[in-house]
Each structure stands twice: as C-alpha cells, then as structure tokens.
Image (cartoon, rainbow, N blue to C red):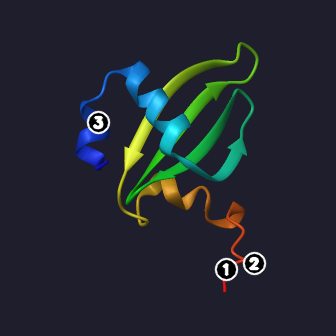
Amino acid sequence: MTLYQFNRLDELEQLEAVWEHGALVAERVDEVNRYKLYQIDAFYVEVEWHKEYNVRRAFYSFASTNAEKMKTYLDKIDISTIK
C-alpha cells in the first residue's frame, strides 16, 4: 500500500489498514491524548486517541522521516535490537 492509496481510504478503511498492516513503532502521551505511530510499508501513520473517552480523534499520515510528527517520537524509538 502506498501513502496515496491510504489517504484515499475512508476513515474505517484507514483504521482497518493500520490494524492489519501497521507495525507499531512508538507511543507517546500528553495531558489529553495518547498517540501511536505505525509504519505501513514505506510511510507512517500517527493515530491520536482521546485518553479519557478512548475515542480516535485523528489520523496523520506522512512518508518522510524528517516530518515534524516523526520528531516527537525520535527519543522513544528503541533501536537496540537492530543489528
């Protein structure tokens, strides 16, 4: 799947694609939300959930590892098992 194909899906199909094809890369939380970063093929998807209500609030998809969204995860990604 490409980033373009993912972005053309409706919200339910995007959620299904994340669950079926996404590899969890990192997680983070703030006062209100929790965020999970997934990799699908050659792009990334951040899923934002409201902590208290456990409701998905947004998807953010991007391909570049230089994207601003990726920078918020860099200190949370464990690369110790990579050889």
Left or right side of 4 for 27: right
N-term-proximal mark, 3 vs 1: 3
Question: What residue does disc 3 label?
Answer: 7
Question: What residue does disc 1 label?
Answer: 82
Which residue is nearer to you in this view: 53 or 38? 38
Q: Amino acid at mark 3?
A: Asn
Q: Residue 7, position in %: x, y? A: 29, 36
Residue 77 lies in quadrant = bottom right
The residue drawn where x is 67% and y is 80% is 82
Residue 25 lies in quadrant = bottom right
N-term-proximal mark, 3 vs 2: 3
Residue contact at pointers 3 and 1, CB within 8 angstroms = no
Q: Secondary structure at mark 1?
A: loop
Q: Amino acid at mark 1?
A: Ile
The residue drawn where x is 69% and y is 47% is 27
Question: What residue does disc 2 label?
Answer: 80
Q: Residue 13, position in %: x, y? A: 39, 25
Per the model, the C-alpha gap separating discs 3 and 1 is 30 Å
Per the model, the C-alpha gap separating discs 2 and 1 is 6 Å
Q: Residues within 10 Å of mark 3 (few under 14, many from 20)?
A: some
Q: Residue 19, position in %: x, y? A: 55, 35
Image height check: is 6 above or below 65?
above
Q: Secondary structure at mark 3?
A: helix
Left or right side of 81 for 11: left
Q: Residue furthest bottom?
A: 83
Q: Amino acid at mark 2?
A: Ser
Q: Residues within 10 Å of mark 2 (few under 14, many from 20)?
A: few
Residue contact at pointers 2 and 1, CB within 8 angstroms = yes
Q: Secondary structure at mark 2?
A: loop
Q: Residue 56, position in %: x, y? A: 57, 21
Q: Residues within 10 Å of mark 1 (few under 14, many from 20)?
A: few
